[in-house]
Image (cartoon, rainbow, N blue to C red):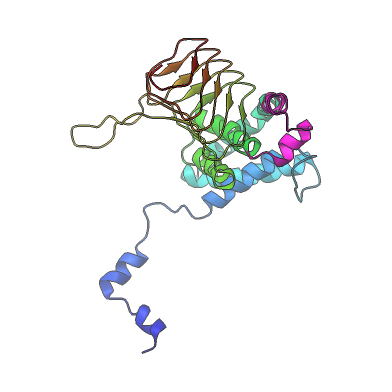
Amino acid sequence: MNFLEEALSFTENELEILTAEDEFNYNGIKDRAEKSFIKIQAAMFPSHVNSEAKSIAENLESACENLIHALKKIFNNNERKAEEVAANLIKKLPDIRKILLTDITAAYQGDPAAKTPDEIILAYPAFIAISAYRVAHELYGMKVPLIPRIITEYAHRLTGIDIHPGASIGEYFFIDHGTGVVIGETSTIGNHVKIYQNVTIGAKSFAVEPDGTLVKGIKRHPDIGNNVIIYAGATILGGETVIGDNCVIGGNVWLTHSVQPGKIIVRSEE
């Protein structure tokens, strides 16, 4: 018996484990969800995002086709519900693009290295991550399971920026450099907020049930006000932590308490 034959010689029990059917068939959902976002991005920014499609309409048609395919699996082949969700998302795209234009403005105005707004769209990883978040957030708001996370994790894989689709983020949002940024599900972030690399807006601890399982669906992440700057490596934790408007949080600061508006924090104990 050669090596390959020996490696493939499973016992009956091992073969049963290996070939057991999953309760739900997720085959194709991830690929279709990612493709739908790529086509949506190409439709919103046709002059900047490469696409084989010849028109915005063609990109939107492809986005719908891929999204409906994924949604039908999620909704147990309920085609009507899948089409309704896809249609509602497409109707939201002008509003999504409008807020993304504020994010581009924030990046261009907030980074002296940016020579043109086009550079933001074409070269800045944060724009991919924020675009994915904005699209996924709409689906999250429609109570669509799984697909919003697939879309934001696609951007996470590309950029190293992890934004949960459940977070609430205002206009003119800029992540500079971006690698290592984490923004948790129940975070809220106001308008005109600028974040640097390796910032975590996360949970301080997790409540548990009597049986030891984690409590789901509670507020776990901080609230960040308007006009806040958070420098590289800062960690802000806890569902009761509020950073007031016009604050500056220094690099590598560890915060688990609230900060009054207008404060500059350079040490955790401040």
Q: Which residue lies furthest to the top in this view?
A: 261
Query: Which of the pair 27/190 is nearer the observer?
Result: 190
Percent coordinates x, y for residue 99 in the rendering: 66, 24
Main secondary structure of the magenta stretch: helix
Percent coordinates x, y for residue 42 in the rendering: 72, 41
Q: In this view, does 60 lie to the left or right of 71?
A: right
221 vs 86: above or below = above
Measuring 31% from the left and 30% from the top, which residue is drawn there? 205
Quick one: quadrant of the N terminus? bottom left
25 vs 234: above or below = below
Measuring 77% from the left and 40% from the top, which residue is drawn there? 48
Measuring 58% from the left and 37% from the top, which residue is drawn there? 178
Q: Is residue 114 left or right of residue 146?
A: right
Q: Which residue lies furthest to the front in this view?
A: 267
Residue 247 is inside the magenta segment: no
Residue 122 visible in image: yes
Magenta segment range? Answer: 100-125
Residue 142 visible in image: no
In terms of image quadrants, where is residue 229?
top right
Residue 119 is inside the magenta segment: yes
Quick one: quadrant of the C terminus? top left
Q: In this view, does 191 lie to the left or right of 236?
A: right
Measuring 81% from the left and 47% from the top, which residue is drawn there? 54
